[in-house]
Image (tube, rainbow, N blue to C red):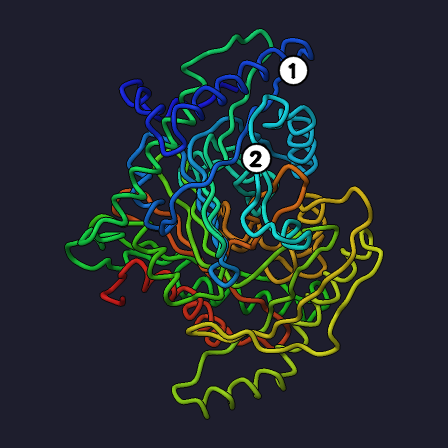
């Protein structure tokens, strides 16, 4: 596909004025010329890429400022791990649907990486990943060009305007990717040169022009008195509607619990949503609030056609690095206590709840079974622990394993998604039940969002505690696992608890 041209021609001359200097412009053009020649020789596209250091910056503040450019912007962050990725522009994209969408995405990405031109092949300095002082550090950090994006919950989501622009699967290679870690900040530039292309200065200048924009933003953020992210002004957001309506959703919960008691299902997850309207819904301001309130959660923001899908999820789907995979079972929830004593008592009750332990065990067993087909060894703690975030606590069991040779993060994501924590058990019965009874298209809600690097390593999280924003409106999503003794009123309250983080982040009904 054609690469984006997200930076206008009037900005191209500043490319040579980046902190990397005029030498970087010369070396980058040499790299793209070599890639174009290689592409012509091979008869297929070739990536040119280079990694450069840049000044330290707040990546979420940079994300907010860079959203003003005419470019696709994607953010993925784990504050707890001191890792944030911000992708800008679109050098390449994979999109597709159907049961084989993960495999197709993996094959397309692997084919593109097969001929990726390294900086050394074009006389550029070899990149040094942030924190690469040890082999283990190198294995745990993204390396070189990476694709960012995600997958819808369903392989073939239904038509509709709500998720316009969000394909069933969409992975984008940004023209520029900011990688911020505790050790520093780098950017990776990338361009895809097609067979028959010549050394095109315009194509070569686009990533460098984006680099100039990033460096300007870094200087502006660092300037005294300049706020990193401005909160939206005006009246607080208000809730316009919930869907399905409360009575209909509770009836669906009752029907699901009955289906479990009758043996047709062991567990099924039902989601609900709310639509809010506010004055200038600001994704960057929402992300800043979420980072402050939920530092142990993964933040994400994916923009398509004027809409932004963002959230702060506590659930990791899969992390693959250095031949090892990490995932987690997260099922069974309770609110936080008002006092420390209350909090501990609620946590003990959650650990002792037969209903929640059953719901959790179903997820653990399903993840163990899925990993068994691709791991040499699997490590599973015998008992769950508590994962606490600001307003809710969950039963959590981390799982880890040593992958068989050749398996990457997209292979693992395909095997694990959807987990029983967002789908149900057995999967073959639960997913049709959701389609029939839930009443709306989940889109990317409860789907995998994340990144994959040139080695096939990467991380995907389950898109929970999230919202789809556009203009002055946002649609928020939350869900609950239903088992035999689930109570509709209690499940409705639990789903509301899970909606609260995004309601607060967006300032809905005055909550901040």
Q: Which mark is residue 44?
A: 1
Disc 1 versus disc 2: nearer the observer: 2
Task: Please say if 200 is above or below 276.
Answer: above
Is 143 in front, or is 348? 143
Secondary structure, mark 2, is: loop
Q: Residues within 10 Å of mark 1 (few under 14, many from 20)?
A: some
| Residue extending farthest left | 234
The residue sitting at 66% across, 50% down in the picture is 139
Is 152 in front, or is 372? 372
The residue sitting at 79% across, 59% down in the picture is 369
Task: Please say if 160 is above or below 233.
Answer: above
Q: Residues within 10 Å of mark 2 (few under 14, many from 20)?
A: many
**Mark 2 = which residue?**
145
Q: Which mark is residue 260?
A: none
Residue 182: x and y in percent read 48, 57
Q: Quick one: label 1 or label 2, which is nearer the N terminus? A: 1
Secondary structure, mark 1, is: loop
Residue 314 falls left or right of residue 496: right
């Amino acid at each position: 596909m054609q690469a984006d041209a997200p930076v206008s021609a009037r900005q191209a001359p500043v490319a040579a004025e980046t902190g990397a200097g005029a030498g970087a412009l010369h070396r980058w053009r040499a790299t793209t010329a070599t890639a174009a020649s290689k592409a012509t020789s091979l008869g297929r596209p070739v990536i040119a890429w280079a990694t450069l250091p840049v000044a330290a910056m707040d990546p979420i503040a940079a994300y907010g400022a860079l959203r003003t450019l005419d470019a696709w912007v994607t953010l993925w962050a784990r504050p707890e791990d001191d890792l944030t990725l911000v992708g800008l522009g679109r050098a390449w994209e994979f999109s597709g649907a159907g049961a084989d969408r993960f495999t197709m995405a993996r094959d397309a990405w692997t084919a593109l990486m097969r001929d990726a031109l390294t900086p050394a092949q074009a006389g550029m300095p070899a990149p040094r990943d942030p924190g690469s002082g040890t082999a283990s550090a190198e294995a745990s950090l993204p390396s070189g060009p990476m694709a960012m994006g995600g997958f819808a919950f369903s392989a073939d989501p239904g038509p509709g305007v709500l998720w316009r622009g969000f394909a069933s699967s969409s992975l984008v290679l940004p023209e520029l990717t900011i990688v911020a870690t505790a050790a520093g900040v780098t950017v990776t530039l990338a361009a895809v040169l097609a067979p028959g292309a010549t050394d095109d200065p315009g194509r070569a200048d686009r990533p460098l022009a984006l680099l100039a924009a990033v460096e300007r933003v870094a200087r502006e953020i660092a300037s005294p008195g300049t706020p990193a992210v401005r909160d939206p002004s005006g009246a607080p957001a208000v809730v316009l509607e919930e869907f399905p309506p409360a009575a209909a959703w509770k009836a669906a919960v009752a029907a699901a619990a009955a289906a479990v008691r009758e043996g047709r299902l062991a567990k099924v997850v039902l989601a609900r949503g709310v639509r809010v309207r506010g004055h200038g819904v600001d994704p960057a301001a929402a992300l800043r609030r979420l980072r402050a309130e939920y530092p142990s959660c993964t933040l994400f923001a994916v923009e398509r056609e004027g809409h932004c899908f963002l959230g702060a999820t506590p659930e990791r789907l899969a992390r693959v690095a250095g031949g090892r995979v990490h995932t987690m079972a997260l099922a069974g929830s309770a609110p936080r206590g008002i006092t420390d004593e209350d909090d501990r008592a609620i946590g003990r009750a959650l650990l002792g709840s037969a209903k929640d332990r059953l719901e959790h065990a179903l997820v653990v067993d399903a993840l163990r079974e899925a990993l068994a087909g691709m791991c040499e060894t699997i490590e599973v703690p015998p008992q769950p622990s508590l994962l606490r975030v600001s307003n809710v606590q969950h039963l959590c069991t981390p799982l880890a394993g040593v992958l068989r040779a050749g398996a990457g993060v997209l292979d693992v994501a395909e095997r694990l998604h959807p987990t029983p924590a967002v789908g149900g058990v057995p999967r073959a019965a639960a997913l049709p039940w959701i389609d029939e009874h839930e009443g709306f298209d989940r889109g990317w809600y409860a789907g995998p969002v994340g990144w994959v690097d040139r080695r096939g390593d990467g991380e995907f999280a389950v898109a929970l505690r999230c919202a789809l924003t556009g203009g002055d409106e946002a649609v928020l999503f939350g869900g609950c696992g239903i088992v035999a003794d689930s109570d509709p009123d209690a499940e409705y309250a639990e789903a509301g608890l899970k909606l609260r983080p995004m309601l607060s982040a967006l300032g809905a009904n005055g909550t901040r």
